[in-house]
Image (spheres, rainbow, N blue to C red):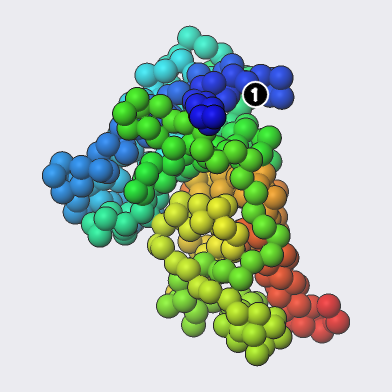
Amino acid sequence: MNPPDPISLRQFLLAEHERHPDAPRITAAMEDIAQATRKISHLVSRGQLGGMLGSAGTANVQGETQKRLDVIANDVMLESLASSDHWIGLASEEMEHSLAVATESERGYLCLFDPLDGSSNIDINGSIGTIFSILRCPTAARRPQDHHFLQPGTEQVAAGFTLYGPATVLVLTTGHGVNGFTLDRGTGEYLLTRADMRIPEDTEDFSVNMSNRGYWATPMRDYVDECMRGSEGERSKHFNMRWVGSMVADVYRVLCQGGIFLYPWDSRDPGKPGKLRLMYEANPMSFIVEQAGGASSTGLQRILDIQPKALHERCPVALGSRHEVQRVVACHRSAMSQLRGVTP
């Protein structure tokens, strides 16, 4: 007996109609994102043949050097979404301010996106991806401004990311679990290949850039040192360290196999509360991880509960297998209690 044909992203979203009142609108909006990521996937696969590698010679709003593909991917996302009636406002990690979209609809969504996560991997043919977050626009805002985007992560309608690896994969949540789709390059369709993705509560894998250890706050060093002491230490088990250098790849592994992804605060730039952007990376990934049974925290606060104050706000990130995130939180609480001179 032949296995049933996998269903397409559109078929999947339409079938969600009974569980999600926004299903028809989300389906149409997601088709715009799917179209954009198909284009980016093709450009990524061309690599040096398409003149995509190397620096663009420009810097983004955070002062970071942009790769050519950063700029191109941002343009593709803007063109695909701005030409659609499904969106009323767009915000990109690569742009200082949001963009109001001229549309006849009063019910368009807001979309925040990191057009190309993992830029340092571009020139070495490493895994990269696109991250997106979808919010409702306040009803009174016909031309939304930056402050209309400043909603806590709990307000997200949907979130997802694509991973441009050996296969192009799209991971999506609309608030009812997490599902993975693989791009069929022959038909151009995203097909459901990983239904109801779940993160194990326990893990023996952690993902962090260990070269930065000397610059972390004490609670994060304490947690990672516990893991590094292995089966002879207080955790009584051997941990493996994984690090790809792109959030999309590291989080996808967490979704598939379990683990914890860490991007701590770094004392080399103490004025910044973290490296990753709350609105473009931490919020959408936290929504996905929580919907897959995992947890997400700054160490002191659930990420999805943060009330954003700025479009490019940053925060520390610990997300993945629930029990390990709880351990990170416990390390932070212990450190805070010691500072106050009380027993945790």
Where 204 falls versus 5 (above or below)? below
Query: Which residue corresponds to the image point at 27% horizontal and 43% vertical from the top-left?
Result: 44
Query: Which residue corresponds to the image point at 60% horizontal and 59% vertical from the top-left?
Result: 258
Q: Amino acid at mark 1?
A: Glu
Image quadrant of residue 134?
Answer: top right
Q: What is the x, y in percent for residue 253?
A: 51, 56
Q: Quadrant of the N terminus?
A: top right
Q: Nearer the viewer, residue 229 or 68?
A: 229
Q: Which residue is mark 1?
A: 16
Q: What is the x, y in percent for residue 54?
A: 19, 54
Where 113 falls versus 289 (above or below)? above
Q: Nearer the viewer, residue 17 or 231?
A: 231
Is 31 left or right of 285, judged from the image as shown?
left
Mark 1 lies on a secondary structure that is loop
Image quadrant of residue 167?
Answer: top left
Query: Which residue corresponds to the image point at 44% horizontal and 67% vertical from the top-left?
Result: 243
- Mark 1, other Cα within 10 Å: few <14 / some 14–19 / many ≥20: some
Q: Is residue 273 visible?
A: no
Q: What is the x, y in percent for residue 109?
A: 54, 25
Query: Which residue corresponds to the image point at 68% horizontal and 35% vertical from the top-left?
Result: 176
